[in-house]
Image (spheres, rainbow, N blue to C red):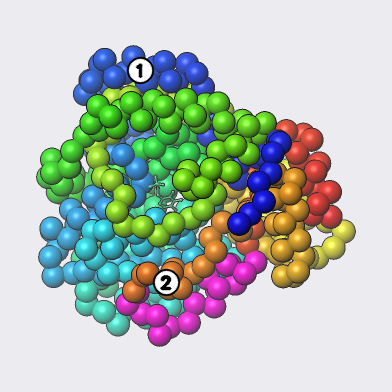
Amino acid sequence: MKAMRIGRTLPPAAAPIYFRDILSGIKGSFQGQKEVDRFARELREYFNVKHCFPVSSGKAALTIILRSLHKLHPERNEVIIPAYTCFSVPSSIVRAGLKVVVCDVTPDTLDFNFDQLRKILSNSQNTLAIIPTHLFGFPADVKKTRECIENFPEVVVIEDAAQAMGSKVMNRKLGTSGDMGFFSLGRGKAFSTVEGGIILTDSDLFAHALHEQIQLIRGYSGIDQIKLIVYSLILFVFMRPLLFWFPKALPFLKIGETHYETDFSIKKMSSIQAGLSRGWQRKLESFLQVRIRLSKHWVDRIGNLSHKNISLITGISSGKWNALIRFPVLVHNGIYKEKILLESRNQGLGIIQTYPKTIDDIPDLKTCNDDQEFSGARECVEKIITLPIHSFVSLKDLSKIEKLLD
Ligand SMILES: *Cc1c(COP(=O)(O)O)cnc(C)c1O
């Protein structure tokens, strides 16, 4: 049992929801499907893609993508994912009735270990899809993943851009390089509608298959919609650092934990969420600017620490990124790391370990290839902590965190 802390507490990641967004959400509910269509149209224009499907969460988006693919290729049932990623990803794969195959990552890039990826691909005829992931918003090399599957033309690339909505690499928006891509509009993501997920694709074939699957799922019931509005009010009030200790102290809100669970709900997006999204392009951009500014701050500061217990992820120091959602750093000394995490809990600084296990180590999950070694992913679990870089982080918070790290 963790001790409850009362007082200013930063969330590890947060996209603010304002009161006027909630009013737009309520207004949106009177517009019905028209409001959802408006949001989908704006997304298609912004991302310059032919098809867009708004659903209830990132997990729902990925599950629907996988179900639609499995319908197209019933003989294939394996999905390759990074061994270090959000637990929602294997949750969705299992929910779609498919098998999880993990591939190691390199701590330098948080991307696949491409040598192991090639081995995994040539060892199996059942690969349905592969999921390059922009973890923490740091861009994965989707092109390189594509090169690896050149000889496996049936394997579909699903871009997990859950944490990367609005980020760019070389002027290409993340989420638009895969055969399909998805975003999350959850609480700790780039931009939030309480909960939500977006699927993008340029392919008419996939769009048709997605459409078929979406026909099979329900929308939000009246009660679900009331819950959405209540939850948006809770987030509006309690996401502020001054009050965030309160929802954090309520165990049923499961805040700050990463869960492997396969019984999440899968619904079409409601008009309330679409209404909440109004003006999203402007919000997304302004949140993104804050995160870029704070990320640059950390790049400078971590580079200049008086000791070498903490270092930047190599890819991040090389500057090939645009906007992150949390700022990951490597801590090379276990005792020092525990001290930082403990002190962050005591002072409410929003520094967390993020993913506590590699995917092959999740107790309730059976992966296909757990005989392999995932030393890179293990290193990420041992060493990565993330610093908060969202709009609620004040100058005073920054200097507290700096003092703690140094
Ligand atoms: C959050 C997240 C998801 C799932 O999105 P939800 O909206 O929370 O279901 C999937 N992948 C990654 C990398 C995520 O961070």
Disc count in the image? 2
Q: Nearer the viewer, residue 389 or 29?
A: 29
* Residue type marked 1: Ile
Measuring 22% from the left and 63% from the top, which residue is drawn there? 97
Across and down, in percent, residue 25 comes to 37, 20
Residue 370 magenta-highlighted: yes
Q: Which residues are magenta?
A: 367-383
Q: Nearer the viewer, residue 175 or 243?
A: 243
Q: Answer left or right for 260 relative to 378.
A: left
Disc on res. 194: none
Specify the label residue 363 is tagged with: 2
Residue 202, image quadrant: top left
Between 11 and 103, the residue placed more toward the observer is: 11
Q: Is residue 214 above or below residue 95?
A: above
Tell me if I can see residue 113 in this picture: yes
Question: Quadrant location of residue 153?
Answer: bottom left
CB-based contact (under 8 Å), mark 2 and mark 1: no
Image position of 194 with respect to 229: above or below: below
Q: Earlier in the sequence, mark 2 or mark 1?
A: 1
Q: Position of residue 368 (x, y in %)?
A: 32, 77
* Mark 2: secondary structure: loop
Query: Which residue bears the numbered disc 1?
Result: 26
Tell me if mark 2 has few (under 14), some (14-19) or many (20+) residues whose alpha carbon lies within 10 angstroms of its own. few
